[in-house]
Image: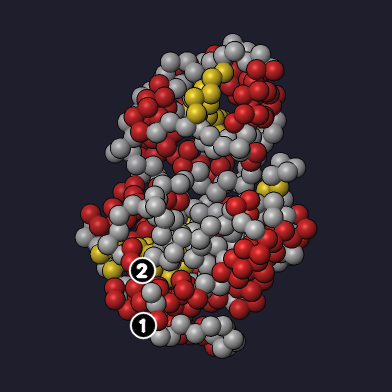
Amino acid sequence: MRILLINKFFFGLGGTETYLFEIREALKKAGHQVAEFAMRHPKNRPSEFSDYFVPELNLEPAELSFWDQVRTGGKVIYSREARRRLARLIRDFQPDLAHLHNIHRQLTPSILFALHRARVPMVWTLHDLQLACPNHMMFDPEEEVICEACRGRKYYRAISRECIKGSPLASAAGALESYLYAALGIYRHWVTLYLSPSQFLRNLLREEGFPSSRLVHLPNYADTDRIRAQFGGEGYGLFAGRLSPEKGLHTLLSALARVPEQRFYILGAGPLAFELRRRADHLGLKQVRFLGRLSGANFETMRRQASFVVVPSECYENCPFSVLEAFAAGKAVLASRIGGIPELVRDGETGFLFPPGDAEAFAAGIRRLAEHPRETEALGRQARRVAEDEYSLAVHLDRLLAYYQRALGKSEAGKEDEAACPSATPFLPSATDATHAA
């Protein structure tokens, strides 16, 4: 099979990119031919298809003048260049299927026009909540609370809240993008299958009007061959992730203040790093250490030697790799009951759940895991079994290929639905002549 992988970034940033590169290698090992389409960037990994990539686009409001932001606004809604470049790659590579990941802003949904015109079936993995929320998180970083203000296509509310990078212009562009493509109907009619990593997101999009027949459930995975399990541990708890408001880290510190004897390590970097260190000092949390961002063997060692892992998120997590990889490492997980997390952590079987933001319940969970090491180890052993049986890379790849075949079988759907979007192409820039691509 000839598979075209599409993601705006082609260097390691987070879970989406980790997924992209690992699936890319797994598909190649399985004998498939794979091409990539992304944005150019100095940190990009090598790709024989990099000549097709779109030029780098800086979207940081703090680094752009007002007029630069205005000029950039149109490009993040509809990129004529991305559409043309992708049309040229489609012509040259002749893919059987396209697998989309994160495309907004840097690539834009304009690329769907090139795929639809070439009759390429589209499978889209939904790594976040972008199709329901212009800022992709349904979280207000200022108030540090869940935000569903834009539910029911009320995207204009994103502008007054400045919920995209605190910028009114960026937020207006995000709202306009959401309205444009919702009005054109291309999300609902042109994408063959949406792969939702959680039932939570699948149900949310059904409520937002996406057709159930195109929404399927495919959880993320943990590479159980690469991640070595160690049951038990050295008595400490571990958080590993981005240090940002939605991750529930203030609640974590409040919980740790209630169990002052518990050793704990916090791994990661982010906008709250300084604030959290200062608060930990203020609370007198001498048993808590911040180690910054670790990777490779150093990170694996810290996780392997932990007794348990916490995921205290206060946003709608989808299907966090942090949970599944902790399972693969043989660790019990103490996590908040929010978003797709309860689909993974089975309370009392592979870990424990607590209400998001509830420091008292969180502390009780920490205390239980710390004071009952045999039970904690048993939870970790069961977590590893679940990872191997249900969430391994091999299991995921088999399911993914089955959905690819299903999408190929439904490839006539684009022709059937073309009439449903009669106004989609006429007023948008044409990209029929792929020879104009750079």
Residue placed under numbered mark 1 in the picture: 435
Residue 56 placement, left or right of 62: left
Q: What x and y, as percent, mark residue 206?
A: 61, 64
Q: Residue at x 69, y 18 (%)?
A: 282
Image quadrant occupied by the C terminus:
bottom left
| Quadrant in the rendering for residue 91 | bottom left
Q: Mark 2: give few (<14), some (14-19) or many (20+) Cα within 10 Å.
A: many
Q: Mark 1: give few (<14), some (14-19) or many (20+) Cα within 10 Å.
A: few
Q: What x and y, as percent, mark residue 212?
A: 55, 67
Find numbered disc 2 in the image and state the secondary structure of the residue it sits on. helix
On screen, residue 407 above or below 265: below
Q: Amino acid at mark 1?
A: Thr
110 and 148: which one is in front?
A: 110
Q: Residue at x 21, y 60 (%)?
A: 31
Q: What x and y, as percent, mark residue 76?
A: 57, 66
Q: Residue at x 75, y 42 (%)?
A: 143
Q: Is residue 17 visible?
A: yes
On screen, residue 154 above or below 84: above
Q: Amino acid at mark 2?
A: Tyr
Find numbered disc 1 in the image and state the secondary structure of the residue it sits on. helix
379 and 271: which one is in front?
A: 271
| Quadrant in the rendering for residue 412 | bottom left
70 and 243: which one is in front?
A: 70
Query: Which badge, 1 or 2, comes first in the chain's sequence?
Result: 2
Residue 315 placement, left or right of 14: right
Q: Residue at x 29, y 39 (%)?
A: 225
Q: What is the CA distance from the residue labelled 1 to the residue labelled 2? A: 12 Å
Residue placed under numbered mark 2 in the picture: 52
Q: Is residue 213 visible?
A: no
Q: What x and y, as percent, mark residue 333?
A: 51, 31
33 and 318: which one is in front?
A: 33
